């Protein structure tokens, strides 16, 4: 029932007094004020009409608002509840709108890869104007001057179709975006936004927009970054764990000669300790040095220790 209607008010704080005319005790404060309401919510008072009335002799006296008991006066605010709500809601929506504009401008001024712009294709990328004129543009690269976009092969008539595409992770499908990219200066991008050719600016959160992926999560880094596992060194470790020191040493030595710093470290340790091979400190020092040259921290530490006891 979303209608404006006018309504009589009730008296909330009726007071009983003695009638000055007939001296009956049935002399009451009554409220016949009228107010405008929206559904059941009072918006504005239209007319104040408070009066004392005797239910016995019908004698009545009008009261001005100022003459009302203080509790009744305080309750007058109830007639404005709807208006107060409307004002509060307007302020809330307006500040929310300003915040959103601020966020969008911030995304525009400080672009990130995969920021997603919704654009009018005719103005943004000079494509012929068709009823399906909306496209998705995604930031690929940017520098101080330029921003490079990939633009969707798909065209849309309505904004909500784009939302659906995002929600169903269509943007990460192969061939969703054209392989042809578009590079614009930052100034041009700002201009396109100001004139409405870019009509929305979105930044993916957790790689998604509207709950669907709009970019692939970045590839996880390899576990042993920079260290290439050497087959012979790995085999040597297996032999060593099995107590086959001679075989282990031979594998480590092969790995060392192939340039594996871990193979060199392991071979050096076996030379130093005389495991699987006759103890040979000069060989140990040599292989430690080779590993240390490759910035192997462990080799550097052990070489330093060894050089405290022996001339290097
Ligand atoms: Zn009376």
Image (tube, grey):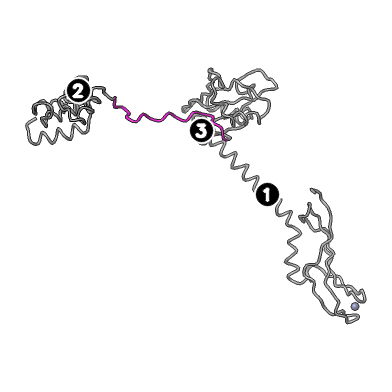
Q: Tag 1: Cα neighbours inside 10 Å, few (<14), some, or many (≥20)?
A: few
Q: Position of residue 128 (x, y in %)?
A: 66, 17
Q: Which residue is mark 2?
A: 251
**What SS does tag 1 mark?**
helix
Q: Vertical placement of 23 versus 298: above or below?
A: below
- Image depth: mark 2 or mark 1 in front: 2
- Return the disc, 3 or 1, that comes first in the chain's sequence: 1
Q: Vertical placement of 282 versus 84: above or below?
A: above
**71 or 13, which lies in front?**
13
**290 or 32, which lies in front?**
290
Residue 206 visible in the displayed image: yes
Q: What distance separates the C-alpha of mark 2 from that of mark 1?
A: 77 Å
Residue 188 visible in the displayed image: no
Q: What distance separates the C-alpha of mark 3 from that of mark 1?
A: 33 Å
Q: Position of residue 42 (x, y in %)?
A: 77, 56
**What SS does tag 2 mark?**
helix
Q: Position of residue 222 (x, y in %)?
A: 36, 29
Per the image, is 213 magenta?
A: yes
Q: Is mark 3 within 8 Å of ligand 1?
A: no
Per the image, is 172 magenta?
A: no
Q: Which residue is mark 3?
A: 207
- Return the disc, 3 or 2, that comes first in the chain's sequence: 3
User: Which quadrant of the figure has residue 32?
Assistant: bottom right
Q: Which residue is mark 1?
A: 89
Q: Tag 3: Cα neighbours inside 10 Å, few (<14), some, or many (≥20)?
A: some
Q: What distance separates the C-alpha of mark 3 from that of mark 2?
A: 46 Å
- Return the disc, 2 or 1, that comes first in the chain's sequence: 1
Q: Which residues are magenta?
A: 211-228
Q: Position of residue 193 (x, y in %)?
A: 60, 30
């Amino acid at each position: 029932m979303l209608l404006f209607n006018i309504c009589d008010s009730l008296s909330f704080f009726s007071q009983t007094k003695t009638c000055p005319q007939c001296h009956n005790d049935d002399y009451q404060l009554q409220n016949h004020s009228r107010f405008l309401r929206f559904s059941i919510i009072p918006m504005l008072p239209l007319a104040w009409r408070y009066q004392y009335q005797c239910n016995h002799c019908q004698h009545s006296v009008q009261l001005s608002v100022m003459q009302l008991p203080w509790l009744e006066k305080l309750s007058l605010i109830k007639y404005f509840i709807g208006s107060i709500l409307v004002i509060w809601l307007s302020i809330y929506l307006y500040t929310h709108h300003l915040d959103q504009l601020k966020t969008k401008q911030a995304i525009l001024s400080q672009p990130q890869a995969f920021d997603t712009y919704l654009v009018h294709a005719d103005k943004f990328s000079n494509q012929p104007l068709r009823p399906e004129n909306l496209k998705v543009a995604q930031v690929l690269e940017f520098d101080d001057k330029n921003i490079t976009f990939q633009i969707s092969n798909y065209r849309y008539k309505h904004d909500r179709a784009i939302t659906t595409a995002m929600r169903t992770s269509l943007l990460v499908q192969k061939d969703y975006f054209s392989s042809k990219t578009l590079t614009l200066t930052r100034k041009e991008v700002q201009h396109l936004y100001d004139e409405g050719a870019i009509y929305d600016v979105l930044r993916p959160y957790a790689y998604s927009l509207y709950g669907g992926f709009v970019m692939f999560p970045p590839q996880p880094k390899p576990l042993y970054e920079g260290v290439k596992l050497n087959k012979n060194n790995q085999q040597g470790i297996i032999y060593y764990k099995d107590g086959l020191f001679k075989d282990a040493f031979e594998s480590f030595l092969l790995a060392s000669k192939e340039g594996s710093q871990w193979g060199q470290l392991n071979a050096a340790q076996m030379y130093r300790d005389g495991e699987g091979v006759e103890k040979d400190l000069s060989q140990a020092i040599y292989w430690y040095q080779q590993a240390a040259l490759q910035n192997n921290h462990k080799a550097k530490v052990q070489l330093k220790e060894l050089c405290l006891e022996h001339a290097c």
